[in-house]
Image: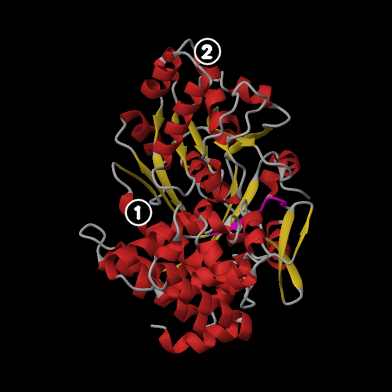
């Protein structure tokens, strides 16, 4: 028996929080670009929780832009899915199971773009959210009248232009637009790109004024570990306990944060209607939230993903059970990241408290967060999340941050391809190929053709870093030495030898 609307009344409600029948009648108020597990485990969680509390009263339309995926499963299950929340908070075991009914339908942008434009005509819409990864918010000089435009900003601009025309520029039909992509000032950046793209397409000045005056672009930060689909055994056990099959079931940690930066009254009012969970924070400045999360959660994740995978660890919790690896993560945060980010606003005490929370979250025994999934767009994540830390450390201390150098060494080693198939590059570990799922994989493949000079060549590639990292005193030689030791001894053995240096 598959999860669907018709079986809701038959379910064991003591094990599940189920939607009331009236939730299916709520109007569509949210447009969501992206169908990924992070959005479903966080933003859609907030919408569903508020709906169940009788506060928001709106549903979400998902716009699917990528090929493949789970569109068929959404249709089969009436857009319902189970969200399993697992974690430990203040020593208390948190286990919660929710059937999320926030999604009304899924539209495929590639095959049904006219349906997306028709959605823009709905007067009930209030909010647009997105998560298209860090590389999704970029300027692509394109015709926004394409069906569909290629980029997310192009799709968003086309959607807004359609709405402007249908409602003749009425100001109250503007939208609150909140990107969740992990970029600093993501709302400001998205707005700049949308305006630049409007200029490229020669759209009328009245429309540009409507964008700036009737729509509110808010920067935001999301923080929740959502590994996604449950491992086979856990999935089977959960489905047996719940009494149905769910092809969209996801698991997340209990910790959650959606920090939205705005002083706009309309946006604040809308978000207040969603604010039934302490994890939704609305503030005029979210810099501290962003810095803590980006540098002390995402930064170590990215520094360590290649290191962990090449050490033979499949999941984050498995790696954190290894004393040497756990000590590396702690040392990286305490000795190098925290000294690089603290100031009069973000104090050392605040950073230390957050870092200990991060360690607890990494050790969450309920989650199977795979390191290989964290390596998605590895190079851009290293650039956006960790390069600023490296430069800041040099500015403050003028010396090589050895733990960061280990992260860069493992990164370069992970990005070494052993073969390619249909334009995709694969690395190899323990006789098994892994996909190097990175837009810059070709650059690394070219650099690795000269293994002896690969560290110098990659660190000097301005297309990757925006500058020549070989100019940082001692950094290249440190990274090269560490990578060569990893190659000679194996990555896990290298970590064991480094253990004496760990905090």
Please state which of residues 246 and 54 is positioned toward the viewer in this rendering: 246
* Residue at image point 58% right, 61% down: 374
Q: Position of residue 13 (x, y in %)?
A: 61, 53
Query: How many C-alpha atoms fall within 10 Å of the one at disc 2: few (<14), some, or many (≥20)?
Result: few
Q: Secondary structure at mark 1?
A: helix
Please state which of residues 324 and 36 is positioned toward the viewer in this rendering: 324
* Up/down of 487 relative to 233, above or below: below
**Can you see residue 86?**
no
Please state which of residues 22 and 287 is positioned toward the viewer in this rendering: 287
Q: Quadrant of residue 209?
A: top left
Colour scheme in use: secondary structure
Q: Secondary structure at mark 2?
A: helix
- In the drawing, does residue 380 fall left or right of residue 471? right
Question: Of the residues under marks 1 and 2, which one precedes in the sequence?
Answer: 2
Q: Quadrant of the C terminus?
A: bottom left
Count the numbered circles shown.
2
Q: Position of residue 137 (x, y in %)?
A: 51, 40
Q: Position of residue 267 (x, y in %)?
A: 37, 32
Q: Which residues are magenta?
A: 246-252
Q: CA distance from mark 1 to mark 2?
A: 38 Å
Q: Position of residue 499 (x, y in %)?
A: 47, 87
- In the drawing, does residue 192 fall left or right of residue 22? left
Query: How many C-alpha atoms fall within 10 Å of the one at disc 1: few (<14), some, or many (≥20)?
Result: some
Q: Quadrant of residue 91?
A: bottom left
Residue 289 is labelled as: 1
Furthest-left residue in this view? 344
**Can you see residue 33?**
yes
Q: Which residue is mark 2?
A: 165
* Up/down of 86 relative to 187, above or below: below
* Residue at image point 40% right, 77% down: 331
């Amino acid at each position: 028996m598959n999860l669907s609307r018709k079986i809701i009344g038959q379910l064991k409600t003591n094990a599940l929080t189920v939607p009331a029948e009236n939730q299916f009648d709520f109007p569509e108020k949210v447009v969501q670009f992206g169908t990924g597990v992070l959005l479903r485990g966080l933003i859609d969680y907030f919408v569903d929780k508020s709906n169940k509390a009788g506060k928001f009263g709106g549903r979400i339309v998902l716009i699917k832009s990528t090929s493949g995926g789970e569109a068929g499963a959404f249709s089969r299950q009436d857009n319902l899915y189970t969200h399993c929340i697992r974690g430990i908070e203040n020593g208390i075991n948190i286990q919660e199971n929710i059937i999320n009914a926030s999604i009304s339908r899924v539209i495929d942008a590639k095959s049904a773009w006219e349906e997306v434009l028709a959605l823009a005509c709905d007067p009930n819409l209030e909010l647009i959210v997105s998560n298209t990864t860090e590389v999704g918010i970029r300027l692509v000089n394109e015709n926004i009248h394409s069906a569909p435009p290629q980029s997310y900003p192009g799709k968003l601009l086309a959607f807004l232009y359609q709405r402007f025309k249908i409602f003749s520029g009425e100001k109250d039909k503007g939208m609150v637009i909140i990107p969740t992509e992990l970029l600093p000032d993501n709302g400001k950046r998205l707005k700049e790109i949308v305006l630049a793209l409007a200029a490229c397409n020669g759209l009328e000045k009245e429309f540009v004024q409507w964008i700036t005056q009737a729509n509110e672009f808010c920067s935001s930060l999301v923080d929740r570990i959502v590994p996604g689909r449950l491992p086979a055994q856990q999935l089977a056990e959960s489905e047996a306990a719940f009494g149905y099959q769910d092809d969209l079931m996801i698991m997340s940690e209990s910790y959650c944060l959606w920090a939205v930066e705005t002083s706009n009254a309309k946006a604040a009012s809308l978000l207040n209607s969603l604010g039934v969970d302490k994890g939704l924070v609305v503030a005029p400045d979210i810099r501290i939230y962003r810095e803590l999360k980006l540098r002390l959660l995402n930064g170590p994740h990215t520094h360590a993903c290649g290191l962990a995978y090449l050490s033979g660890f499949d999941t984050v919790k498995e790696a954190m059970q290894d004393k040497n690896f756990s000590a590396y993560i702690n040392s990286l945060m305490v000795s190098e990241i925290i000294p690089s980010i603290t100031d009069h606003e973000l104090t050392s005490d605040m950073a230390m408290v957050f870092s200990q929370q991060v360690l607890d979250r990494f050790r969450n025994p309920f989650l199977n967060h795979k390191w290989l999934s964290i390596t998605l767009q590895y190079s851009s994540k290293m650039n956006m999340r960790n390069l600023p830390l490296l430069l800041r450390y040099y500015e403050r201390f003028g010396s090589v941050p050895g733990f960061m150098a280990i992260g860069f060494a493992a990164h370069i080693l992970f990005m070494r391809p052993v073969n390619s198939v249909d334009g995709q590059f694969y690395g190899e570990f323990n006789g098994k190929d892994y996909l190097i799922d990175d837009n810059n994989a070709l650059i690394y493949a070219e650099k690795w053709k000269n293994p002896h000079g690969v560290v110098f060549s990659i660190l000097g590639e301005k297309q990757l870093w925006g500058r020549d990292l070989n100019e940082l005193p001692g950094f290249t030689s440190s990274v090269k030495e560490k990578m060569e030791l990893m190659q000679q001894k194996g990555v896990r053995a290298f970590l064991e030898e480094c253990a004496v240096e760990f905090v």
